[in-house]
Amino acid sequence: MLISRIKSGTKVADVISGGSMPAWITLVLLLIAAGVTIPGFLLPERLLALGQQVTPLLLVAIGQTLVVLVGGLDISVGAVLTLSLVLASGIMQGRAEWAFPGVILCLMAGGFVGLLNGLLIEGLRLPPLIATIGMMSVLQGVAWVYTHGAPGGSVPLAIRFVANGRLGILPVSDIVFAVTVVLMVLLLQRTVFGKQLYAVGANQRAAQLAAIPVKRIIIFAYVLSASLAAAGGLVLAGYVGVGTLEAGGPYVLNSIAAVIIGGTKFTGGEGGVAGTVVSVAILAVLTAILIQLGIPVTLRSVLLSIIVVAAAVLQSRKFGR
């Protein structure tokens, strides 16, 4: 059955929706609540600004989705984002001529970290949780040594434009948001890699029998995850302007929350990008409501953790695990 599904192509519903209907319903209800509690929240310019704010999380969460689809998990994404941020500000030092080389170096660094994660998991057979937690610790140490434990450096106007600029009425980061989503949906829906990714996540043994390069697919998923996290760090660098060591912390839990709430099966093989995108929007709207209600950041973190656990429980019941 699995082999015939690979040959016939993955259905659009499998790739795009991924069981994300509850997330869509939740988003609509939260938008209504936000419209009631926050004056002007549903105005187009306010919603565009919201998309602008969540672009770094979107990039990280989509990468996390790819890893979860093959039955893995990447705890190092926050540390990759932080490393990309501090490298960008340290390399560029506000100089326009270093903008492009700095971007390439940061993306290459992210891809290299993802490659190491994949090799640890598929080469040394380490559990994904252990491998990526270890990588997170290493990267945190590298970022600390690079910055000497203090914020520093700066990014040029070109990077700031990506985060804060506009083309007409559209924020540039919203365009990055949209292009990333479209490319990732096409990657999963229209390419051999996308079909193989789902096959590996659904049943590795059957995928091997179908002559799918399982190890290569898993390693590449981790490379893409870390590369997208590095891209998120670059966009965040445009917001904050300097390298800071605390930036990536919230992105680990938030990216996992976006994946689970969006309906991607935590053991792999089912889910997609759209569910993750909707979940990122849910987290953004929920955060805005909690801020409006005066809920402190520590309590917001507790509430987010409860939501993640509840979503995981509901998902386990749904899939009968």
Image: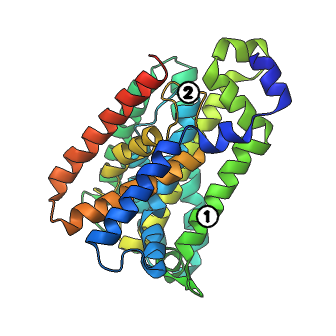
Q: Image check: 319 left or right of 104?
A: left
Residue 214 falls in image quadrant: top right
Q: Residue at x 41, y 74 (%)?
A: 42
Tell me the quarter of the image containing the C terminus: top left
Q: CA distance from mark 2 to mark 1?
A: 25 Å
Q: Earlier in the sequence, mark 2 or mark 1?
A: 1
Q: Percent position (x, y) of residue 231?
A: 53, 58
Amino acid found under the numbered disc labelled 2: Gly
Q: Image check: 169 left or right of 143?
A: right
Q: Is residue 89 above or below residue 261?
A: below
Residue 121 visible (yes or no): yes
- Element assignment for label 2: loop
Residue 178 circle label? 1
Which colour style is shown?
Answer: rainbow
Tell me the quarter of the image containing the N terminus: top right
Amino acid found under the numbered disc labelled 1: Ala
Q: Residue at x 28, y 46 (%)?
A: 304
Q: Name the one closer to the observer, 256 or 99.
A: 256
Q: Percent position (x, y) of residue 170?
A: 57, 80
Residue indicated by mark 2:
268
Q: Percent position (x, y) of residue 39?
A: 30, 79
Q: Percent position (x, y) of residue 106?
A: 53, 57
